[in-house]
Amino acid sequence: MKLYKEHLLTGILSALLASTGGAVLIINSALKAGFTNPELISWMFSVYFLGGLLNVGLSFIYKIPFGGAHSITAAAFLSTSIFYFSIEELAGAAIMSGAVIAFFGISGLGEKLLAFLPVALMDAMLAGLIFNHIVQIIPAIKETPFIGMFALAGFFLFPKLIKKCPPILGVIGLGMLALFIGYDLPKFDDIPFSLPYMVTPVFSWNSFVSLSVPLSLLVISNDIFVALAVLRKNGYEPSAARTITVTGAAASLVGWFGGHSVNIGGMMTMLCSSDEAGPKEKRYFAAIVSGLLVALFGLMAWKVIAFIKTLPISFIWMITGFSLMAVFMKSIQSAFSKPEYRYSTVFTFAIAVSNVSFMGISAPVWSLAVGIFTMKWLGEGRNADEG
């Protein structure tokens, strides 16, 4: 296998996308939920190491550039819902979610499911979940203005100076520079190395409805389907049924180690399959580079966790908010660009933003339920073209 600079550069950029905001989001969520260091290490290791290997394997076998690790949108969803569940319940929900994804791949029902759940409502739910992370950017900058100004400068300057550079890399780069100049980082916690361990899953109807179903929908609609669409746009013909099935099986596997998902990713696949990744027949090398680097990042989970724990919480809020901004803009535009879903999208978005659980069922599930009821009751969406 001969690597060219295009493969290396694109693969590195793709891996950085997975290993920045997504990692911070997982760690911040787990810490708020009270997970222990071994539990957090197991979660991080499983989604990055096994997620990287999944995409390496798919890329090598099919000679198609599959890029990905875990679902950042699913991690964003969990950050609003994980507090009500133990790691055992999270493991059970992730296993069931993977089984649901695999079922839709085997049966071919994935596209029918998305036809029943309009894209506008799914995006309204996702935008509502992410909105709370976006607004945290403002108080975070107010709390540490020096770091915030550097982070904002990185957000606006890096894409101008470096072609195809995602703004989040500028936020992290200049934000870390500001930390080095004007902030005394505390000493690293002495977190010992530990291997991932098998979590004894707890399966319940509540976790299935509140976690498994939303996780499945988010991974299928916002990750797998986006990646498949990007690949087809760039001239590849991946098998949708096979890709969804393999992804579901892998997601169930990582659930046993406390991971929430592994899958191909839309943005990472877009980078690895683009013209910048070199000749079309060799672009899968870029995806292999990306997957190997993501897997290596997973092997270093305990060091990553120790480092991120030393960062000011305001900087973590900034990274989280900025890393989700592109997803938020895409979701909000999609949700409110279709006049056929006026009231149903508003109700879906508002309930998701509220993050209020009722009868043991999380806000995202209620948001979709109320949105679909509103859509049906008012007769919305009858003439919509969901693509």
Image (tube, rainbow, N blue to C red):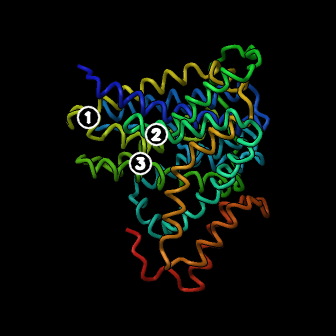
User: Are dots 3 and 1 in contact, CB under 8 Å?
Assistant: no
- Which residue position is annotated with label 3? 244
Residue 178 at x, y percent in the picture: 64, 27
Q: Amino acid at mark 3?
A: Ile
Label 3 vs 1, first from the N-terminus = 1
Q: Amino acid at mark 1?
A: Lys
Label 2 vs 1, first from the N-terminus = 1
- Which residue position is annotated with label 2? 166
> Where, quadrant-wise, is the C terminus in this rendering?
bottom left
Distance in Å between CA atoms under marks 2 and 1: 26 Å
Residue 18 at x, y percent in the picture: 50, 35
- Which residue position is annotated with label 1? 63
Determine the residue positioned at 66% across, 60% down. 364
Q: Residues within 10 Å of mark 1 (few under 14, many from 20)?
A: some
User: Relative to residue 72, is residue 32 drawn left or right?
Assistant: right
Q: Amino acid at mark 2?
A: Pro
User: Relative to residue 302, is residue 66 drawn left or right?
Assistant: left
Q: Does residue 25 appear anywhere in the picture?
A: no
